[in-house]
Image (cartoon, rainbow, N blue to C red):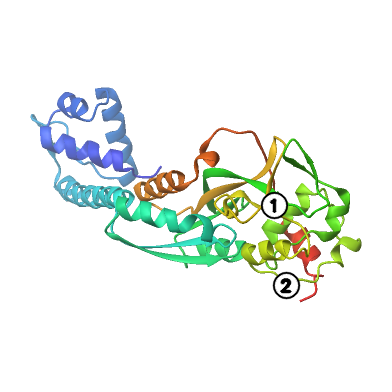
């Protein structure tokens, strides 16, 4: 048996009230239950803590020292509890947020305005990273929070879903459209533009297009080393291919013609990802609320989406490794 904090609370209460019934009432436990716990503790220690022959109840000489140490231990335990509560409610200091590069330019400026009003005493450090860097950063402590596509599939990471972002098509001139919606043309797949080093994003696109075999000609055709959605959009404008992009990247871009998919539209789940040791609960809630409030209205409306998985990344790392630099 192992000594517990509850047992220590019982002996301190007995010392305060010197009466089993009163101590049991204060501890919100039955008198027999308290008596049994005291007996168990004395048997474990091999020392009598209270002299039951005395009226009122009195601690033994050794019991007085044990009770003194118990009070110190409980004080420290309460201090830990209070520290954790302060940590969860702390809205001061600095916080490092890593953001997936395919989302950062289109949401972070609006988010920073919103969160700045909510948490004026916090300094935010924003780092734009790819998926692998975000996961490593949270696990090593280099960043506090990651805003990224999920699920990660990692047991040491905790995910708090913020919203689902649909993908839209930037079609080429031969695209098939039905009632303003995009329908994938099998011939388009040969012109699909991907992003270099964004394995989870590329995995989602290949899933949307139904591309399963990384060893076929599809892996040989990509020759562009594209690192940003904006470059990809400009390549579509130049007639160099077609693209599938997150809706936030085009929803406020009047110069870009895009088509939505038929429902359930393919989408990606965007979450705040933290380590399992992260404690600042109130801050996380403030960030989540500010992100949600920064979204355009269409993304806050209830729609049916088909979430695209990406946690089979090793397959796609191998597939994309054949791209020409």
Give the camera-side residue of 32 and 187: 187
Give the camera-side residue of 147 and 86: 147
Q: Secondary structure at mark 1?
A: loop
**Image quadrant of residue 289?**
top left
The quarter in which the N terminus is drawn is top left
For the residues marked 1 and 2, what is the alpha-carbon distance in whole angstroms?
Answer: 21 Å
Residue that badge 2 annotates: 225
Q: Residue 310 bears which disc, if any?
A: 1
Q: Residue 133 bears which disc, if any?
A: none
Indicate which disc, 1 or 2, sits on the residue closer to the N terminus. 2
Total marks shown come to 2
Residue at the far right: name it.
216
Q: Secondary structure at mark 2?
A: loop
Residue 174: x and y in percent read 83, 51
In the image, taking residue 180 as reference, residue 104 lies left or right, namely: left
Neighbours of disc 2 within 10 Å: few (<14), some (14-19), many (20+): some
Neighbours of disc 1 within 10 Å: few (<14), some (14-19), many (20+): many
């Amino acid at each position: 048996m192992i000594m517990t904090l509850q047992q220590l609370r019982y002996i301190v209460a007995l010392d305060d009230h010197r009466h089993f019934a009163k101590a049991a009432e204060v501890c919100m436990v039955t008198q027999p239950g308290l008596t049994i716990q005291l007996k168990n503790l004395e048997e474990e220690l091999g020392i009598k803590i209270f002299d039951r022959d005395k009226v009122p109840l009195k601690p033994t000489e050794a019991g007085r020292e044990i009770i003194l140490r118990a009070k110190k231990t409980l004080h420290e335990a309460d201090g830990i509890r209070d520290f954790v509560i302060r940590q969860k409610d702390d809205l001061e200091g600095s916080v490092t947020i890593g953001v997936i590069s395919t989302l950062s330019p289109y949401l972070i400026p609006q988010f920073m305005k919103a969160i700045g009003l909510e948490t004026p005493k916090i300094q935010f450090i924003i780092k734009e990273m790819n998926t692998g860097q975000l996961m490593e950063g949270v696990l090593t402590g280099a960043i506090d929070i990651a805003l990224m596509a999920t699920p990660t599939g990692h047991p040491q990471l905790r995910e708090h879903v913020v919203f689902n972002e649909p993908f839209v098509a930037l079609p080429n001139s031969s695209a098939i459209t039905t009632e303003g919606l995009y329908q994938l043309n099998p011939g388009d797949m040969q012109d699909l533009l991907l992003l270099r080093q964004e394995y989870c994003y590329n995995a989602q696109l290949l899933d949307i297009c139904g591309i399963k075999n990384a060893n076929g000609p599809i892996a040989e055709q990509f020759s562009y080393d594209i690192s940003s959605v904006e470059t990809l959009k400009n390549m579509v404008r130049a007639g160099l291919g077609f693209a599938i992009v997150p809706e936030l990247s085009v929803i406020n871009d009047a110069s870009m013609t895009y088509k939505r998919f038929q429902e359930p539209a393919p989408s990606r789940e965007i979450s705040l990802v933290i380590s399992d040791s992260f404690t600042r609960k109130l801050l996380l809630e403030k960030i989540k609320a500010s992100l949600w409030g920064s979204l355009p209205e269409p993304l806050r409306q209830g729609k049916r989406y088909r979430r695209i998985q990406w946690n089979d990344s090793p397959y796609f790392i191998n597939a994309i490794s054949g791209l020409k630099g």
